[in-house]
Image (cartoon, rainbow, N blue to C red):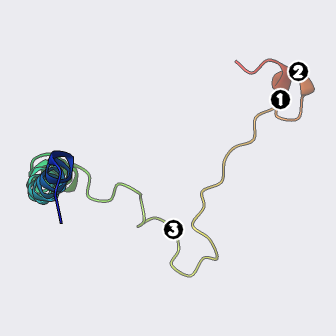
Amino acid sequence: MLFTISDILISLWRKWQRAIHGINEVIATILMTLTYALAVTPVSIVFRLLVPDPIDRGLGDPHAKTYWKPVPKEDDANDIRRVQRQY
């Protein structure tokens, strides 16, 4: 069985690709961990210190059917001209 240079180069290329993909997995895991630790964690700590309940879960009667807050209806809400001028 005779190997040509192209067969040897293809084999080397595939081994190179496997090695690089393995290295890439390690680097990606390290970079994503550092990104999370350096970006998400400080923001979370600041939010916990400054805003104790950011979505306002503590308001209302605990036995109420819903915690939705009523939205005041504007006077011209049903006026077709308001829909025609969006801004």
Mark 1 or 2, which is nearer the eye? 2
Q: Are marks 1 and 2 in contact (CB under 8 Å)?
A: yes
Looking at the image, tell me whether mark 1 or mark 2 is earlier in sequence order: 1
Mark 1 or 3, which is nearer the eye? 1
| Residue 44 visible in rendering | yes
Residue at 83% in and 26% down: 83
Q: Position of residue 12 (x, y in %)?
A: 12, 53
Q: Which part of the image, by quadrant, shows the N terminus? A: bottom left
Q: Position of residue 70 (x, y in %)?
A: 65, 54
Check disc 2: other Cα within 10 Å, few if <14, some if 14-19, many if 20+.
Answer: few
Q: Position of residue 7 (x, y in %)?
A: 20, 53
Residue, disc 2 = 81
Residue, disc 3 = 60
Disc 2 element: helix
Residue at 60% in and 76% down: 64
Check disc 1: other Cα within 10 Å, few if <14, some if 14-19, many if 20+.
Answer: few
Residue, disc 1 = 76
